[in-house]
Image (cartoon, rainbow, N blue to C red):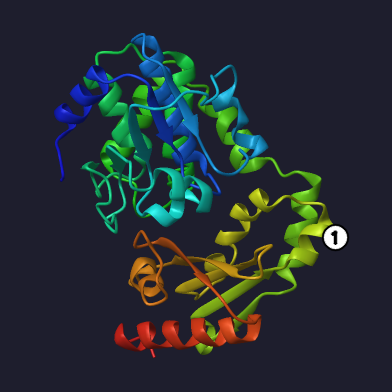
């Protein structure tokens, strides 16, 4: 059942022993919104903690510094920035997928799996919603909370470059800066700094770029062997996802990551008028109009052909080929 902001804030004020779930393969938005909420609940004297199936990438680790571990049996479960149960990861999803009391999200593809859902698909990031929720809870936003929230807003907008940015997104960022967020540091560390291992991974990935449909569709591939050769962790793949779309003339870009279990995670990024969520929905995935994802099984060549078939159909439907 969809609820309003005020009801979500009241539910959080009145419950205790609250477990906050972040999605697997965590990004800045799910982590920033989860840990900002956790800090707000702790400020209210609540028992709260964040649970994520996968390790937090080093570049985002500041959000979790000094935070408690989830070592209690929760009475109330909150999912943040999670559109479907499968995005929680296998272990977390199996344990808590049917126990989510409240979901706070900005994906229009949300499957409404939670008992109550605060959904605003006009928000550029879950952190944009969480900022309003915490204010409605009556909690003073500290500088570290502001930095958590700014992290999510900036990462889900590509540092305010994507088409999902609204005037409210920019106002939110400005207010978070006023509240003490060190935006310059976050921008530098997240968007401008590359580890040596990522630079090596990027070099290998660039050699894999292929284009199709007269240059309207491009792919990049990262294999497990590339991770081993570069020394990069899988969390460093995220910055690779934008590469295909940045090529001149490309309307649909797909970054393909081989996973340890042999399946392939596909991150699709689009330029107007193409819709990434609609493309990924054809492969049992989902996301946003400009950024979405799915998981494919089979060989890399089989998956390339699946992608090509789906994207060709979408381009033809849009009148581009």
Q: Please determine whether, in this image, residue 227 is positioned above or below residue 51.
A: below
Q: Name the residue under label 1.
A: 229
Q: Nearer the viewer, residue 233 or 17?
A: 17
Q: Can residue 33 be seen in this view?
A: no
Residue under the point 76% across and 51% down:
232
Residue under the point 41% across and 32% down:
20
Please provide percent x and percent y for residue 251: 45, 74
- Determine which quarter of the picture holds residue 96: top left
Q: Is residue 259 left or right of residue 156?
A: right
Q: Which of 256 and 169 is in front in this view?
A: 256
- Determine which quarter of the picture holds residue 46: top left
Q: Is residue 184 left or right of residue 207?
A: left
Residue under the point 71% across and 74% down:
208
User: Element type at marker 1?
Assistant: helix
Q: Which of 206 and 167 is in front in this view?
A: 206
How crowded pointer 1 is (Cα within 10 Å; few <14, some 14-19, many 20+) is rated as few
Q: Residue reaching furthest right? A: 229
Please provide percent x and percent y for residue 107: 31, 52
Image quarter (top left, top right, bottom left or bottom right) of the C terminus: bottom left
Please provide percent x and percent y for residue 66: 58, 16
- Determine which quarter of the picture holds residue 166: top left
Residue under the point 25% across and 50% down:
121
Please provide percent x and percent y for residue 217: 51, 79
Q: Please determine whether, in this image, residue 264 is positioned above or below residue 174.
A: below
């Amino acid at each position: 059942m969809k609820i309003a902001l005020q009801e979500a804030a009241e539910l959080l004020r009145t419950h205790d022993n609250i477990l906050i779930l972040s999605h697997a393969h965590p990004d800045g938005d799910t982590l920033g919104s989860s840990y900002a909420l956790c800090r707000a609940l702790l400020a209210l004297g609540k028992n709260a903690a964040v649970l994520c199936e996968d390790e937090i990438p080093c570049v985002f680790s500041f959000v979790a510094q000094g935070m408690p571990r989830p070592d209690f049996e929760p009475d109330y479960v909150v999912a943040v920035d999670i559109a479907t149960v499968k995005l929680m990861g296998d272990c977390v999803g199996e344990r808590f997928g049917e126990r989510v009391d409240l979901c706070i999200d900005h994906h229009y593809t949300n499957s409404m799996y939670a008992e109550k859902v605060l959904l605003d698909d006009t928000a550029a990031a879950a952190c944009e919603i969480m900022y309003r929720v915490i204010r409605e809870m009556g909690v003073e936003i500290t500088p570290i909370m502001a930095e958590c929230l700014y992290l999510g807003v900036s990462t889900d907008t590509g540092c305010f470059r994507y088409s999902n940015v609204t005037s409210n997104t920019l106002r939110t960022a400005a207010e978070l800066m006023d509240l003490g967020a060190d935006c310059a540091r976050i921008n530098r560390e997240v968007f401008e700094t590359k580890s040596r291992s990522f630079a090596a991974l990027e070099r290998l990935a660039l050699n894999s770029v292929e284009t199709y449909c007269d240059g309207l569709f491009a792919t990049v591939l990262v294999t497990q062997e590339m991770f081993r050769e570069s020394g990069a962790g899988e969390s460093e793949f995220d910055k690779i996802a934008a590469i295909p779309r940045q090529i001149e003339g490309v309307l649909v870009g797909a970054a393909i990551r081989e996973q340890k279990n042999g399946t392939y995670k596909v991150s699709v990024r689009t330029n107007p008028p193409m819709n990434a969520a609609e493309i990924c929905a054809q492969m049992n995935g989902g996301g946003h109009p400009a950024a979405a994802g799915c998981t494919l099984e089979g060989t890399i060549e089989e998956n390339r052909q699946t992608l090509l078939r789906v994207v060709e159909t979408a381009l033809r439907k849009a009148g581009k080929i």
